[in-house]
Each structure stands twice: as C-alpha cells, then as structure tokens.
C-alpha cells in the first residue's frame, strides 16, 4: 500500500505531538506541588537516555518528526529530572534539619 508522503509526515507529527505533550501535565504537577517524590529517578534517567538516542537517530536519518518530537520530549524530561533532583535534595535537607532540631528525649521512630 502506497501512502502519500504528506500523509505519512502528518501522522508522524501527530504521533510526536501526542506523545510529547503527555509530559506537560506531569511537569506542571511537579512545579505546582514542589515535589517529585513519586517519580522514579532511575526510570527518568533511562527514559531520557533513550529519548536522546531517538533524537540522534532522527538526525541521522533526517526524519524531522522524530527530531522535533524527541528534542521537545528530551527538554521536558530533563526539566522533570532537574526538579526531581532539586525537590528531593530540599526534602532530604528539611528532614535532616527537623531531626537535628528535635528536642532531647523526643523520638520520631
């Protein structure tokens, strides 16, 4: 079956838009809650690496739907990773401070 190249490109861009935009609600949620505790750091690291490889692949084969989608997805994924690192570090520091400022004789165990 021969499909016109314009239709193929449209399908590619629609797929790219759909999968990329799916990260926007997660990013907004992390920003709004100032927490990324429920996000797996390992998963997002591997995912970001995979998206980076897809981006390279798209560049090599000159597939602009693949390039555009993965560039945008990588940017969103890196933003989520940065917030994850920032908020997780802040949470650990706050917990450490709370433990250090606990009055003598009080235990939270």
Image: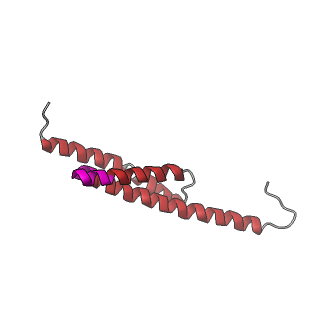
Q: Nearer the viewer, residue 45 or 98?
A: 45
Q: Determine whether, in the image, residue 33 is placed left or right of residue 73.
A: right
Visual colour scheme: secondary structure
Q: Is residue 89 magenta?
A: no
Number of residue marks: 0
Name the residue at 66% across, 66% down.
94
The percent position of residue 70, horizontal first and vertical second, equals 33, 53
The range drawn in magenta is 55-66
Q: Main secondary structure of the magenta part?
A: helix
Instruction: Report whether 77 appears left or right of 35.
Output: left
Q: Position of residue 3 (x, y in %)?
A: 14, 36
Q: Quadrant of the C terminus?
A: bottom right
Q: Using the rendered view, name the quadrant where residue 68 is placed.
A: bottom left
Which quadrant holds the N terminus?
A: top left
In this rendering, is residue 95 above or below 11? below
Q: From this viewpoint, which residue is outermost toward the top?
A: 1
For the residue pair 11 and 102, the one nearer the viewer reads as: 11
**Is 96 displayed left or right of 3 in the figure?**
right
Magenta-drawn stretch contains 61 = yes
What x and y, as percent, mark residue 52?
A: 37, 54
The residue at 37%/51% (across/down) is: 51
What residue occupies the far front of the structure in this picture?
60
Image coords of residue 80 (percent x, y):
46, 58
Q: Horizontally, is 58 left or right of 104 in the view?
A: left
Q: Residue at x 48, y 55 (%)?
A: 29
Going 16% across and 41% down the picture, which residue do you hit?
Answer: 7
């Amino acid at each position: 079956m021969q499909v016109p190249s314009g239709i193929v490109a449209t399908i590619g861009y629609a797929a790219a838009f759909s999968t990329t935009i799916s990260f926007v609600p997660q990013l907004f949620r992390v920003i709004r809650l100032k927490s990324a505790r429920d996000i797996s750091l390992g998963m997002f690291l591997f995912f970001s690496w995979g998206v980076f490889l897809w981006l390279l692949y798209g560049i090599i084969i000159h597939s602009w739907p693949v390039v555009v989608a993965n560039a945008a997805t990588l940017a969103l994924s890196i933003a989520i990773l940065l917030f994850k690192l920032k908020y997780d570090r802040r949470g650990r520091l706050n917990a450490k401070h709370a433990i250090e400022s606990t009055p003598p004789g009080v235990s939270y165990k």
